Image (tube, coloured by chain):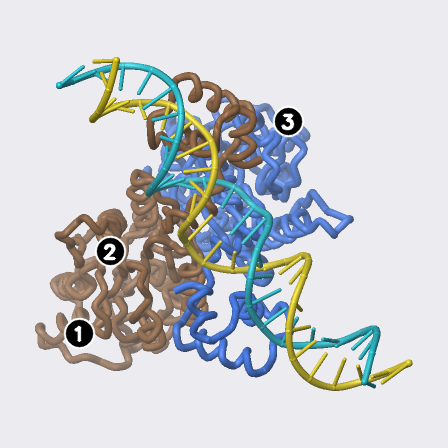
Chain colours: A brown, B blue, C cyan, D yellow
Amino acid sequence: MNIKDVANRAGVSISTVSRVINNTAKVSEDARKRVEAVLKETGYRPNSLARELQQNKTYTIGVLICVTELSMSSLSQSINAITDVLKANNYNIMLANSRYHADEELSIFNTFKEKRVDGILYFAAGFAKKHYAMLKNYKIPIVMIGQKSNYIDMPYVIHDDFYAAKTATEYLIQMGHQDIGFIGLPDYDEAAGLERKKGFKLAYEMNNLPLNPSRMTQGDFSIESGYEAMKILLKNPDDRPTAVFATTDFMAIGAISCANDMGLKVPDDISVMGFDDVHVAAFYQPPLTTIHTDTHAVGTKAAELLLSLMDKDNPNKITKYVASYSLMERGSVRPL
Amino acid sequence: MNIKDVANRAGVSISTVSRVINNTAKVSEDARKRVEAVLKETGYRPNSLARELQQNKTYTIGVLICVTELSMSSLSQSINAITDVLKANNYNIMLANSRYHADEELSIFNTFKEKRVDGILYFAAGFAKKHYAMLKNYKIPIVMIGQKSNYIDMPYVIHDDFYAAKTATEYLIQMGHQDIGFIGLPDYDEAAGLERKKGFKLAYEMNNLPLNPSRMTQGDFSIESGYEAMKILLKNPDDRPTAVFATTDFMAIGAISCANDMGLKVPDDISVMGFDDVHVAAFYQPPLTTIHTDTHAVGTKAAELLLSLMDKDNPNKITKYVASYSLMERGSVRPL
DNA sequence: TATTGACATGAAAAGCTTTTCACAATAATT
DNA sequence: AATTATTGTGAAAAGCTTTTCATGTCAATA
């Protein structure tokens, strides 16, 4: 069943059917009715492949994320916001997850190009040199989310990772903690994790506290990695930090879980601070004190930014946006 | 840049370029080398729209899910498994989320049809009459995940919701609980939530326990709804159940959070049982006693099943699969 | 030497739309 | 009444592949 069949049945030409479907030009009342009847009767749906091929536009946006598991990420709210904005502008979404495989990411970029997506929303987690070569003359508009690149000038929407981490650390210090364990993320060049670590260090420095290398641990976003990092921080019963700053809520949850297993109560025996304010954070026991990031705004802005980028008629393009954050005081940190 | 340009540059015909790209017929060493050089030099990628149009096959599978937020669902593992299987068979995924809007679901089915996906994986949450009319002669192969339909004969992969819920309830009864609060899901015809409720009821009945209507509450998958339901169950300090069966881990988390806010400790003062075994369940405080569902198997089987359905040469098609489950005894339930 | 077969290659059709252009018929103007 | 403008319509091109079919070349056979 194609447009030709519809045309034959309705006794009109292909062009007329197209005009009725897309409401792109005047059609006589008579012809319109006949076409609409056939449309309804047959349930015909135009083949978007043909349409997109001819219009050279797919109305599809590729969204590339990088998480081990959908449920373990802080970006689901952003994705909801993106969906809302794009849907309102008649765009579809093609979601792909690289799951931390750099090669997979490259392959997804290739697929996006082959599928002719109109634009890409790229939740980057450690933009690598490899990507630079490919993206340099990629042609399709891309908005980076969650990090910016120094190698390539690309529009971005990010959280204020650096200052938020600094704020979190200062808060712990204000609460009297002078010995803070740190659970960081892999030090990918340019990635959010590195910014958070820098923020932590600066706050430490500005308060004239000595940075103790044995307090610096590393995870990989996952609960399990937070658990393992905490194990290291609590290894020596005689030499433990009084607070821990986990740069991810899920790692904070892992850390608290570990503390519990080792007979330590949070926050009575040790304080734990998170980052992200994921949905369960407020309902955890104890409720997580954390940095609330405006994931909704990030998603919305990123989508809007991409839309404006794709709109050739729009001369004034915003290309960078840094989202706001706030500190949520809940139950996992106590004054020393 | 299209195949014609490549052909011109390499001094061969379009057909030859196509043959080199797809390795579909013998090409002389000389021509192949010239084409490959141009390919590399230009970074040309064939336009899949044209290819798919001509082959009448898109190598794309539509995955329709229905969750309020990606992070709040128990299906992320299934989606990972699906990705693995489909990727291995060279299929792409188009993920769409209806977010519990029945109309949106219909519109997604339309989009899938227009985009000419080769098959659909449908995480159903309350298959409605509306859908029946549309799906009856939809033509594209669909595998339902998470529920089966009585109205329409459609291949499905499901969890054993009924027996799992029965097992969970029997476990609570074995532990000495005779007054169990129930936090269910909307009673959509055919949905998993209803099966779980039936399982609960049967276990109650078989143990000759009287079903108390005031103990039957309802949520909507979300943490918040579990919290609210628990509020109702704990309203009267003199008349409280000794255990609560929440048919979703996230609702269980909400319930425990509520109990805490009301000064009740879990499991000391009240036991709470979950369902799903989401990732955080094991790391919650207390660690959640729950039904572990084999989400990985569900995803794998569903994808395999769809693949076999799409393969016209394959005569023996499995069309139904019920996944195994197990009970995870952790810390949120104690013997009375 | 003449014939057959294998092989590499190119021209052209097919897949389904949208859109431009031209044409005819009607309505409006002078 | 004659010309111009408007309107609705259809034919055909364009968008980019894959694939079939025919052709020409060369090697192998009779």
Q: Residue at x 62, y 32 (%)?
A: B149
Q: Quadrant of the N terminus of chain A?
A: top right
Residue B165 % position (x, y): 59, 38
Q: For the residue labelled by badge 3, is the local secondary structure a helix, a strand or a loop?
A: loop
Number of other residues with Cα within 10 Å of mark 1, as a class: few under 14, some 14 to 19, many 20 or more: many
Residue A221 % position (x, y): 36, 64
Residue A14 % position (x, y): 47, 33
Q: Amino acid at mark 3?
A: Tyr
Q: Which residue is mark 3?
A: B151
- Decide which of tag 2 and tag 1 comes sooner along the chain: 1
Q: Chain of mark 1?
A: A
On residue A290, the disc is: 2
On residue A201, the disc is: 1
Q: For the residue labelled by badge 1, is the local secondary structure a helix, a strand or a loop?
A: helix
Left/right placement of residue A226 relative to residue A177 reads right
- Up-down: is A298 above or below A185? above
Number of other residues with Cα within 10 Å of mark 2, as a class: few under 14, some 14 to 19, many 20 or more: many
Q: For the residue labelled by badge 2, is the local secondary structure a helix, a strand or a loop?
A: strand
Q: Nearer the viewer, residue A171 or A191?
A: A191
Q: Residue at x 46, y 55 (%)?
A: B279
Say yes or no: labels 3 and 2 on the same chain.
no
Is any atom of residue A277 visible in this view?
A: yes
